[in-house]
Image (tube, rainbow, N blue to C red):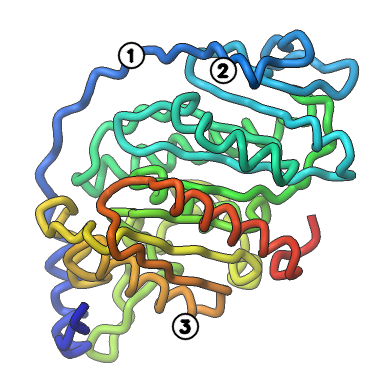
Amino acid sequence: MERRTASFLGIATSVLLALLVAACSFANPVIAPPNLAPPAHLATSASPTQPNMPSPAIVTGFLSTESDLLIYVPTAARTVTRPRVLVALHGFGGNGPSFGREFVEEADRRGWVLVAPTFHYRDIADPDKIRQDDVTFAPRLKALLDELPVRTGLAVAKRAHLFGFSRGAQMAHRFALFYPKQVSGVASLAAGTYTLPMRTLRVADVDTSLPLPYGLADVEQQIGSPGSESDLRAVSFWVAVGGRDNRVADVPRSWDALVGKDRVERATEYSRILTRFGAATELAVFPDAGHEVTPAMRKAGCKYLGDVDRAGLAVAP
């Protein structure tokens, strides 16, 4: 991929224009309730608990009885003092249980408690709707993580791993920006837009504000008190994309001047931004993949998150 050669001043000036332009909106899909019945070989070993009810002991298997949420506790979680939580975040028009089932094998192997919620995103191009959805759904995800000990009967690690695809990748990295003290590692695959870990951009010797969803200038007003920059630097990021996921028409134009014109350019540039910011970051480009989650992608992302724990890159649970 060729490097973008525009001067910084040209890029910065374009940012000012981009923030004034709203992208075209997309039609909302109809999302059918998924079938939550687990595969035969993954049948639960205990009766499901009711949502928000205390568990008298550690239970394993599929715990959620809700049509839009999967919670899975592997047997291996019993042997871990504070098991890590993996949050699997689906893309636009998807649902948590269907997306989350693809991570059950990794959860079993690594002893992770698996959580896959459903978020009904309204738009993938309109910056204002993207912001509204994220500041609505991120606190809901935080509340879900906070109540996991009650739902599962386990004293889980306070910091979770997040694996997001497409629109879910946007939610994953923004959740880390909003609540860095609750995140250990982020696997962001094929995001279409990104939020920069900064409040301003220097334009002609003047600091220009970057509000959500471009930056963090107004994060206190939108979310509340965020973590510090040092908290965010403690989070590790795997930024990945398919090499053929490079259709310019597939992503909104408002981010062009900030991170590039397609998903490959944007993943590459965002990984550079995170590295300059001081966060441990790894870029992965899968040459033969398009806009998808292949088994190799899923395995590589989960391996990265597992390596974060083993290498001690993350702060204490």
Q: Amino acid at mark 3?
A: Arg
> Picture quarter containing residue 202?
bottom left
x and y, in percent, of residue 314 in the image: 70, 65
Q: Amino acid at mark 1?
A: Ala
Badge 1 is on which residue? 32
Badge 3 is on which residue? 276
SS at badge 2: loop
Q: Are marks 1 and 3 in contact (CB under 8 Å)?
A: no
- Foreground mark, 2 or 3, reads 2
Badge 2 is on which residue? 39
Q: Is residue 111 left or right of residue 274?
A: right
- Using the image as rendered, state which of residue 21 and residue 293 is in the foreground: 293
- Using the image as rendered, state which of residue 120 and residue 130 is in the foreground: 120
User: Is 28 placed above or below 215 here?
Assistant: above
Which mark, by number, is residue 194? none
SS at badge 1: loop
Q: Is residue 22 left or right of residue 122?
A: left
> Picture quarter containing residue 2?
bottom left
